[in-house]
Amino acid sequence: MNPTYEKYFRSDRLPHIWCPGCGNGIVLGAFARAMEELNIDKNETVVVSGIGCSSRATTYVDFNTLHTTHGRALAFATGVKLAEPRLKVFVFMGDGDASAIGGNHLIHACRRNIDITAIIINNNIYGMTGGQYSPLTPTGKKATTAPYGMIERNFDLCALVKGAGATFVARSTTYHAKQLADLIVTGAKNKGFSVIEAVSQCPVSYGRRNKMKNALEMVNWFKEHAVNVKAAEKMKAEDLDGKFLIGELHHSEAPEYTEEYDKLIARVQGGGR
Ligand SMILES: Cc1ncc(C[n+]2csc(CCOP(=O)(O)OP(=O)(O)O)c2C)c(N)n1
Ligand code: SF4
């Protein structure tokens, strides 16, 4: 491990549980580089996760961590942030965790614009439980619960959270690991709810069912199909067919929830907390 980043990990918890080729480690690497760039105070930082392969992140990162229940990471994180607004709060979730069982918490965190940075690792599938489809499994792709191909339309996660009110929305992939780290930095600096979708590979539960036989093929697919949002502005619609956008997709300002809550306390009780 690079000695600069060692301090962000609990080396005594290694080896990790992830399969060879899994993208989760690349996302954690990007997270560690972002923490270094932000010069983050570990004691003033809380990292929360739900349940899933990706949510296992809180076992390995050395911060104040909460490994909670499936779909409820944002509920716990909201409680932490409301109790101690000075803390920096990050949340790791899988696509199933964030957009299925936890979908309601996600849209309401966006609507409140609470100052939390959510990193949603989108591997298109429920990895930990063996490959059931999630709301982010693309139409037509196979899962254990969609052996003939998914017939539902998948969410565009970034469009969903933008529509729900998140003030920073970005997407990158495990191929674009440097960009991913930069986006986590910008998201963490945003005073409000930030969502970074990290498109990642699950070669075991998703790739091998969908004609991508290993992690390399999957990461190369990200390389070939991701288009930077700035480059996309100059491209024709037909050239973007079948591609997906990466980069900073939305950045806006809105009242932040804990600040509004403090104002409410001051108004009703007089004085702050
Ligand atoms: C309330 C509840 N329902 C279901 C489960 C079983 N379960 C554990 S992980 C998981 C899915 C994980 O998929 P995802 O959130 O996409 O994360 P990944 O494993 O792909 O990283 C499920 C359904 C659970 N632990 N708790
Ligand atoms: S099942 Fe998929 S997401 Fe889970 S550790 Fe293995 S490769 Fe990673």
Image (cartoon, grey):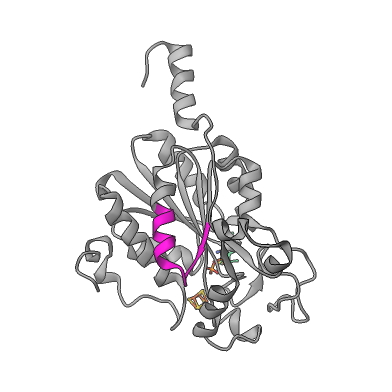
Q: Looking at the picture, how far across and down is residue 144, in whole percent? A: 68, 79
Pick the residue in front: 140 or 62.
140
The tally of labels here is 0
Is residue 67 at all visible to an observer of this figure?
A: no
Identify the residue shown where x is 39% and y is 59%: 181
Q: Looking at the picture, how far across and down is residue 67, in whole percent? A: 42, 57
| Residue furthest left in the image | 3
Asked if residue 173 lies in the magenta stretch, the reply is yes
Query: Taking 7 as reference, is 202 left or right?
Result: right
Query: Taking 258 as reference, is 104 left or right?
Result: right
Which quadrant would the N terminus be assigned to in this image? bottom left
Pick the residue in front: 220 or 114.
220
Pick the residue in front: 126 or 200.
200
Q: Looking at the picture, how far across and down is residue 251, in whole percent? A: 53, 43
Query: Taking 76 as reference, is 210 left or right?
Result: right
Placement of 36 over or under 173, stated as above or below: above
Identify the residue shown where x is 45% and y is 44%: 116
Is residue 169 at all visible to an observer of this figure?
A: yes
Identify the residue shown where x is 65% and y is 87%: 211
Quadrant location, ligand no. 1: bottom right
Q: Looking at the picture, how far across and down is residue 215, in whole percent? A: 50, 83
The residue segment tinted magenta is 171-184
Placement of 102 over or under 1, stated as above or below: above
Pick the residue in front: 56 or 244.
244
Q: Quadrant of residue 184?
A: bottom left
Asked if residue 189 lies in the magenta stretch, the reply is no
Placement of 115 over or under 36, stated as above or below: above
Q: Quadrant of residue 4?
A: bottom left
Query: Taking 214 as reference, is 101 left or right?
Result: right
